[in-house]
Image (tube, grey):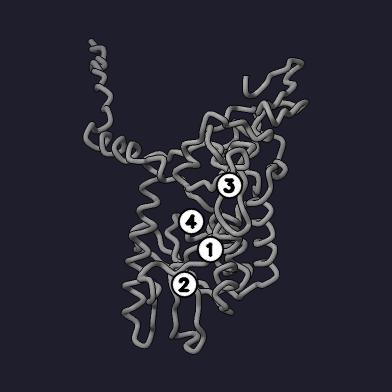
Amino acid sequence: MWCQKRTPLMVKLPERKADPTLAAIDEALEARQHRERRRGYLGMSAIGNPCARQLWYSFRWACLVFFKAATLKKFHDGHTDEDTQADRLRMVPGLTLITEDPETGRQMGYSDFGGHFRGHQDGHIEGLLQAPKTPHVWEHKASEKQKDLQKHINKLGEKNALKAWNETYYAQHVLYMDYGGYTRGYLTCSTPGGRQQIAIRTEANPAHAEQLKRKAEKIIFSDNPPDKIRDDETYYICRWCDYSNICHNGAAADRNCRTCTWSTAEREGGWTCTKHNEDLIQEKQAEGCDDHRWNPAFVPGDLVDFNKDANTLTYEIDGQRWTDGH
């Protein structure tokens, strides 16, 4: 007589929830972000972004961007790995790395267009074993895509690899070389934590630097945003953009001086309010005032009337009229 084989009773294990302590850390990291985190200038570290419209929204403070804890941790990796790489470079005999301006004690930086366009280079390096007599701009990046850089080096050669790997990093590097009077840049890249590292030297490109400056100038001093990079919110750049809902769907922007039609970025520096004829310090810009009227670029309709004395702007939106100021 054969005995029927019995299937053991399977008891479902309870799903393990996220560790509450670690989850609390992530919540604390995200909650620590404040309005003061708004950057008052257009950064040279961002100007290589292929979507100029995104940069315009950022410069105009269209909305306050909050980062998830994972992204904030990546930012932290970048800062700590930069310090680690600097310490390692200084171990090389004959190599000099300067990461602070001797006069100010701060990170070396550049400024243009009245301070509206700024950048801060990681360092100035001399005594590289492969080019001991040539001063270089030094930049460090912590990236999980470090291996891709090596592939571009193998395929395109060292001087063309950085642009192919990351146009934003390349633009930053080119501008620092241009503003600092360098002919070469030296970029080190490590995996987060600094276990694996790679380096690349890049030549100056004055023509491209000039193009980037003109791009920055147009973004800073234009009241209207550049064209969309693609009129399709599912396009990969738009899909991950913090301003996509404003750009593609007409969502409301943040109410502050930079989204107001009365504000102007001055070429000699700073912002002014033409309504109240006053200079706007950065804290004031974030607060705004009761006389705020939207820059027409932030209203998803056609401007049909502007009454300066009454401080009203009337739009036609989907066949109906709406007046900003009533």
Type of amino acid at the residue the image marks with label 1: Leu
Q: CA distance from mark 4 to mark 3?
A: 43 Å
Q: Residues within 10 Å of mark 3 (few under 14, many from 20)?
A: many
Q: CA distance from mark 4 to mark 1?
A: 7 Å
Residue at 42% across, 46% down = 37
Type of amino acid at the residue the image marks with label 4: Lys
Indicate the quadrant where residue 128 lies: bottom left
Disc 4 or disc 3, which is closer to the eye?
3
Quarter containing the N terminus: top left
Disc 3 or disc 2, which is closer to the eye?
3
Disc nearer the start of the sequence (4/2): 2
Q: CA distance from mark 3 to mark 1?
A: 44 Å
Residue at 53% across, 60% down = 118
Instruction: Please tell me whether residue 172 is drawn above or below residue 317 in the rendered image.
Output: below
Circle 1 sits on which residue? Answer: 149
Disc nearer the start of the sequence (3/1): 1
Circle 4 sits on which residue? Answer: 145
Secondary structure of the residue carrying tag 1 is: helix
Find residue 7 and report its horizontal and vertical position in percent.
26, 16
Circle 3 sits on which residue? Answer: 272
Type of amino acid at the residue the image marks with label 3: Thr
Q: Residue furthest top?
A: 1
Given residues 231 and 66, the one toward you in this image is 66
Disc 3 or disc 1, which is closer to the eye?
3
Q: CA distance from mark 2 to mark 1?
A: 17 Å
